[in-house]
Image (cartoon, rainbow, N blue to C red):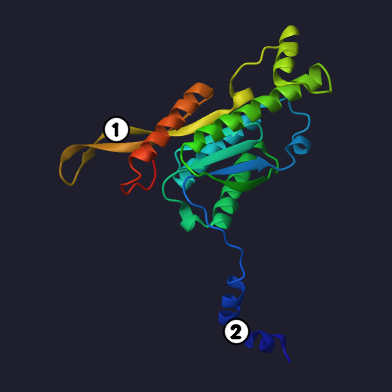
């Protein structure tokens, strides 16, 4: 029997129903965070300085692309990870495999192109029980970023054996190395601001005021925290109305 004859006997509709019913599909509900981690960055980026600025700028640009694509309002890049905060309605009906695969593809593509080398990110979804949990989650990841930064400096410059965070900070300061709270230690946030701009409607021959989503960024952990709190407040305020995203 010719191979074409074999394929002609295959029933794609029946097999589609059979295998689609066995696909592992999880559904995510709002609010949630998509966390993306660099795969093997310690090895792939070996030789670069601790918290290399070009690498960080590539992750921040990835944050911006993710915010635009997912119509999100907040993203945080620190160390080798990116956290995308999703409030309101979720894309793709909340299908987890779509969200994580597309998010990791976008970030991997942006970072690889900007740094001119192949970089990969894995992704997972952090399901939040309340939008206010996003505040604790942001502080948690900022603290992990600070911990990792200080530990890296300490093991390179002082001792290969890590101590408590406070002890390591004091030891580094004693050697003239001050730990600033900035993009190297706690990262950069990308957020959306709604800005009113004046435009012109040629059909009605009149000036109109339109609201635009404008991307901003900050290396100030306090300012980022304030922006995230305001986003959560806005989300809570419109929760009982038809708000697609804040």
x and y percent of residue 201 in the render?
21, 42
202 relative to 156 in the view: left or right: left
Residue at 79% over, 23% down: 162
Residue at 56% over, 58% down: 26
Is the Cβ of the residue at disc 2 closer than 8 Å to that at disc 1?
no
> Which is nearer the eye, 6 or 97?
97
Residue 163 falls in image quadrant:
top right
x and y percent of residue 158 in the render?
81, 16
x and y percent of residue 180 in the render?
62, 16
> Which is nearer the eye, 181 or 64?
181
Q: Residue furthest right?
A: 160
138 relative to 154 in the view: left or right: left
Residue at 15% over, 44% down: 204
x and y percent of residue 109 in the render?
61, 45
Regarding residue 57, the answer to whether it shows in the image is no
Task: Name the residue carrying label 1.
Answer: 196
Residue 183 falls in image quadrant:
top right
Residue 165 falls in image quadrant:
top right
In the rendered image, the vertical position of residue 24 relative to residue 41, given as above or below = below
Quick one: label 2, few (<14), some, or many (20+) residues within 10 Å? Answer: few
């Amino acid at each position: 029997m010719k191979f074409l004859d074999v394929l002609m006997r295959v029933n794609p509709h029946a097999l589609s129903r059979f295998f689609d019913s066995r696909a592992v599909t999880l559904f995510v509900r709002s609010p949630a965070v998509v966390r993306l981690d660099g795969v093997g960055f310690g090895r792939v980026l070996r030789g670069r300085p601790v918290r290399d600025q070009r690498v960080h700028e590539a992750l921040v640009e990835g944050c911006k692309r993710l915010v635009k694509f997912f119509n999100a309002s907040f993203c945080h890049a620190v160390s080798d990870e990116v956290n995308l905060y999703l409030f309101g309605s979720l894309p793709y009906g909340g299908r987890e495999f779509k969200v994580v695969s597309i998010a990791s593809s976008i970030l991997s593509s942006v970072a690889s192109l900007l740094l001119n080398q192949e970089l990969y990110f894995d992704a997972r979804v952090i399901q939040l029980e309340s939008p206010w949990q996003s505040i604790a989650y942001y502080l948690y990841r900022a603290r992990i970023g600070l911990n990792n930064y200080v530990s890296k400096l300490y093991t390179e410059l002082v001792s290969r054996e890590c101590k408590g965070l406070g002890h390591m900070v004091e030891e580094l300061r004693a050697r003239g190395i001050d730990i600033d709270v900035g993009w190297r230690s706690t990262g950069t946030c990308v957020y959306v601001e709604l800005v009113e701009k004046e435009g012109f409607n040629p059909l009605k021959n009149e000036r109109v005021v339109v609201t635009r989503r404008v991307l901003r960024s900050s290396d100030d952990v306090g300012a980022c925290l304030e922006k995230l709190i305001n986003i959560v407040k806005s989300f809570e305020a419109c929760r009982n109305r038809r708000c697609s995203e804040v």
